[in-house]
Image: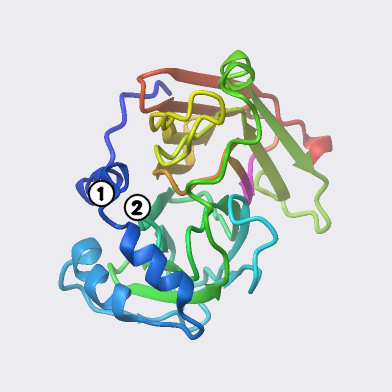
Amino acid sequence: MTIKPIRLRSRVVAFVILALVGAAMPFAASAQSASVPDTKTWDGLKGDVFGQKPIGDAGGIITIDAPKRAEDAAIVPIDLHFKTDAATGRIKAVTLIVDENPSPVAAVFQFGKDAGVTHLATRLRVNAYSYVRAIAETEDGKLHMTQTFVKASGGCSAPAMKNQDESLASLGKMKLRVFTAKTPGNEPMTRATEMQLMIRHPNNSGLQMDQVTRYYIPAHFIQGLTVSQGDRLIMSMEGGISISEDPNFRFEFDAKPGEDVKVEAADTEGKKFQDEWPLESSSL
């Protein structure tokens, strides 16, 4: 599978532009001072992202876990679990939204038809006290939402953990960890308990300041990501500035022993990265 240049959906592009011009900063300030959850931002936002489509309650189809108060607003762990059975239908896409971020749409994930993804975790920047929402789209086209409120501030403008030279030296390097299965499945499909993909990339938000020059660092982030095994898609992602530095994704899916796992990514500067790992039966 060869990755093609990935263009973000218009809704993601619009919010990234909004972030770069700083037009949403007043919203972040007001959210930070709020002591109770406020849904006004979401009420004005959901139509821009999903149009007139009704959004129902998650109903157990998707759940979200995040710290109520983040230790580090630049790397807030987000943990999603999906219920997929005959009654609920397959989840084909999940949109992650941070209401009060300058670019609220953090990422849109698409899942392969027979990938069987039941768990996905990543790390987000959270710029102000905000709801973090996960909206799942099932095969019938219906939307199901769950949310949690996270107390954090300054995540999108927080200084990078590494200096720019160090980040560029290791740009695009990937590592894949395979965790031993706790419950073996039936051949030829086997439940891979967990895999963790780590990508070296500064994922600059465009709102961070170089501590030496005092100039803003231009936005530079992973824009598209595809994970596949053999010739089948496991998941793909369209990302924005809210994904943390050194993107990290932990996921569970139906793996086929003996078929390589391949990852392809592209960033906003047109750079492409890829790697491939064998998946032995003994790893599952």
Q: Amino acid at mark 1?
A: Leu
Say which label, 1 or 2, has the lower sequence index. 1
Towards the viewer: 191 or 272? 272
Towards the viewer: 199 or 184? 199
Q: Is residue 283 left or right of residue 227?
A: right
Q: CA distance from mark 1 to mark 2?
A: 7 Å
Q: Residue furthest left?
A: 52
> In the rendering, at what x and y percent does residue 137 appear?
36, 65
Towards the viewer: 82 or 121? 121
The answer to whether residue 266 is visible is yes
171 over 113 or under it: above or below: above
* Residue occupying the point 65% across, 29% down: 162
The answer to whether residue 138 is visible is no
Q: Amino acid at mark 2?
A: Ser
Towards the viewer: 173 or 34? 34
* Residue occupying the point 20% across, 73% down: 53
Which mark is on residue 2? none
Residue 5 figure quarter: top left
Q: Are marks 1 and 2 in contact (CB under 8 Å)?
A: yes
Q: Secondary structure at mark 2?
A: loop
219 over 141 or under it: above or below: above
42 over 182 or under it: above or below: below
> In the rendering, at what x and y percent does residue 267 appear?
41, 27
Q: Which residue is mark 1?
A: 18
Q: Which residue is mark 2?
A: 103
Q: For the magenta stretch, what is the residue range?
A: 249-256
